[in-house]
Image (cartoon, grey):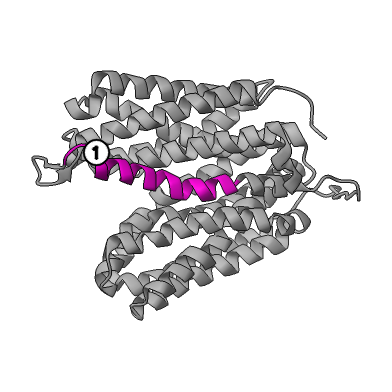
Amino acid sequence: MKRFENKWIRAAIPALLIHCSIGTVYCWSQVSEDIASYIGSTKSSVEWAFSLAIFFLGMSAAFLGNIVEMDIHKSSLVSTIFFCAGMAGTGFFISQKSLPGILISYGCIMGIGLGTGYLSPVKALMLWFREQKGLATGLAVAGFGLAKVIASPLIEYLKGKYGIVAMFYILAGLYFVMMFMGHLLLKKPEGWVETHDKNDRKPIALFKNKTFIGIWIMFFINITCGLALISQEKAILKAIGLAGMVGLICSLTAVFNAGGRIGFSAWADKLSDRNIVYKVIFILSILFTGLVIISKGIIQGYAILVIPLLFVINAGYGGGFSNVPTLLSDHFGMKKISQIHGLVLTAWAFAGLAGNQLATLVVKNTGQFVEDTHGNLVNPSGYQNVLYITIVLYAIAFLISTFMIRKGKIEE
């Protein structure tokens, strides 16, 4: 009974406290327009804060992975301080109407907190839940995905009652309490001792390993394609005549995103080869994308095809995240897994820039913007054209999953 309590109290609960806090980064779209208006800047300029946050998430995870490896207690405290300082700093620089200050606070400082916070609980979870590694990491990473669902109404309430500046100060205080509690509770199992051998291969040398390269590219493609569609999700729904249901459907896609993180990773625990999960994700993504392409679903307004596509893409996007650490542990073992996972998260850093920009480039330069029945400017042909690129990328990812990532013993 004591072990059951410990693994939840020392790993699962702190992981959720930390991930449900840092996952709020995905709420930026709710406040970016208000911030742009408040400081007298353009929305596109303000949006760079989010792109920088994701970039610094991936890069800090790579370069600070050794700190996480050595001491998750220290790394979780670093995450708490940087994330909450960045949140409070964002509020301060909004009050000063300083765009560079916002970019540094939300993008750089918070980004460092995101990277260390994302990594810190993962190894502890896999050590405590050795027989259910996928389920454990899936629960934590689902917290990152569900954070937007939980925080969205709170942000709307605080923004309306106290204003955009005070909202950031309040959230900084709230998340500091949650993350600090997670920091205090987080602990590796007793008896686990890190071993270091002078002959150990440096994690950076993994970029010469075919399996690692395959996982990195596969992860990059899944995020790039996912963000390309998710970033256009609201516009696509308006284009197919569902402007009045955007809020509801986006909440449902967020549930599928979180569900994919738990469902795919829990299913992977029952498989002899976790890579099967990625093959299924890519096959489903290709199938549903192909149906919408063939039917011209977005142009014709076929909600019966477009909405399932968004559900599948969100579920696969989330499942791709939750299965990476356990897939890596299956191939490279638990030693230095935090550093190895951190290196793979650099794919997230670059995909965070590539996905949104790819979709924006296609939509701006192809098709034609027209007004829908609610007066919104939409570009159905442009959104449809994004699918031609994503289906090719998903096909490449499937081939990589099939031929570069083979089932086998732990690689030395």
Q: Looking at the picture, does residue 102 appear above or below residue 388?
A: below
Amino acid type for the residue under numbered disc 1: Thr
Please give the name of the residue rendered at 79% of the width and 48% of the height, measured from the top-left corner. Answer: 202
Q: Is residue 144 left or right of residue 28?
A: right
For this rendering, which residue is in front, 372 or 180? 372
**Residue 115 falls inside the magenta stretch:** no
Q: What stretch of residues is rendered in magenta?
A: 345-368
Please provide percent x and percent y for residue 92. 41, 78
Residue 134, image x, y percentages: 63, 34
The x, y position of residue 52, in whole percent, is: 47, 59
List the residue tagged with mark 1: 366
Q: Is residue 229 above or below residue 150?
A: above
Tell whether 283 sits left or right of 402.
Answer: left
Front residue of 206/326: it is: 206
Q: Residue furthest right?
A: 198
Q: Quadrant of the C terminus?
A: top right
- At x 24%, y 69%, the residue is 37
